[in-house]
Amino acid sequence: MAFKDFPGQEQGVHLLQRSLERGRLGHAYLLIGHELNELEGLARALAKTLNCLQPVRGAGGVGIDSCDQCVNCRKIEQSNHPDVHWLRPESKSRVITIDRMRDLMQEIHFKPSESEHKVAIVVAADRLNVQAANAFLKTLEEPPPKSVLVLLTTEPQRILETILSRCLRLNFSGEGPRRLADEDKEWLGAFSEMAGTGQKSLIHRYRLLDIVLQKLSGMKSRTEEELTARSPLQRYEDAEQDMRDKWEEELTAAVEAEYRRQRSDLMNLLQRWFRDVLLQTIGKGESEIGKLNLTEDLLHFPWLKSSRSVAERISPREALDNLQLMDNLQRLLHTNVQEALALEVSLLKLSL
């Protein structure tokens, strides 16, 4: 894929292309977005453009996009170009360790062997541990000539400020929350309908938990299938065993990282629903200026009438406690807590 294949990201792509045209490309970029896969594609497109043998040229005759066909572009697409290096979280700890970072820094300090630029791409840079991040600072401050460092993240708030301050940031997230996919809209409707029934039994809570767990299970299976299909393991069956072991570790880590991102998005979706419930509990009460007039513009999901049923049964205090429970659940899920247990405890405590 080339820059032209990202029609929804014109603004960020234009900024990169303008920097290329003016000869002012930065030495370190932080690409921020909702989808790690899309960010990887953008980073790959940048690496291709920098090293393309037949680039698409702008007004000044400088390459601003790749041909996506030459030998360099094909090698970069297949993740086997000697001058383009990828660093991903490790499988067991799901962090980027100082040893892996040192390996990357050693590679990036060598002169390019086949192309004009060395490119290092750090996937899920929010998973750099403190030691790796600190070791990386020196390279960020004094990068080797003809090198470009690209960090990717869906959670910039988890990156050390010392790293953030040394990178040019490009936001590919778009404005506001992402458009809700039909599949997610249907799932949230089922969750809302179950929550709105008003049943107080333990069985009802476990049915609600089952709706969440089934959704998460489907997400993980789909993520494994998609990332496995793109892994070099599927293309190079005759590769040496140590290389296959490395790809296996990277695949496992990539699946876990993408699943965690999607899980976080799902929890954010529930938080937005519980916020709607909170607003509706406030709207049913009396204030000094009379009953609050809640317009649909204030609600994330005004078409879900079941949230109003929940709001009719609980107080604003209970609704606020629900939001705080969901916020605490998000923090727990960023640790190594057992997922099913954390979800079970949280859902049992909710006021519905």
Image (spheres, helix red, strand yellow):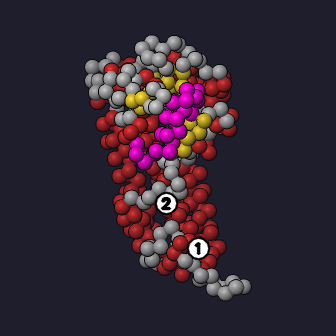
Q: Are marks 2 and 1 in contact (CB under 8 Å)?
A: no
Left or right placement of residue 3 versus residue 297 in this view: left
Above/below status of 67 relative to 280:
above
What residue is shown with label 1? 279
Q: Which residues are magenta?
A: 6-29
Name the residue: 55% across, 29% down: 22
Where residue 155 sits: x, y (%)?
A: 56, 45
Image-quadrant location for residue 61? top left
Q: Is residue 45 magenta?
A: no
* Label 1 residue SS: helix
Considering only vertical position in the picture, is 292 above or below 88? Answer: below
Residue at the right extreme of this rendering: 288
Q: Which of the labelled discs sits on residue 269, or is there none?
A: 2
Q: Earlier in the sequence, mark 2 or mark 1?
A: 2
Secondary structure, mark 2, is helix
Q: Nearer the viewer, residue 25 or 243?
A: 25
Amino acid on which the number 1 mark rests in the picture:
Leu
Q: CA distance from mark 2 to mark 1?
A: 16 Å
Residue drawn 67% across and 87% down?
290
Few, some or many C-alpha atoms within 10 Å of disc 2 (few <14, some 14-19, many ≥20)?
some
Residue 130 falls left or right of residue 80: right
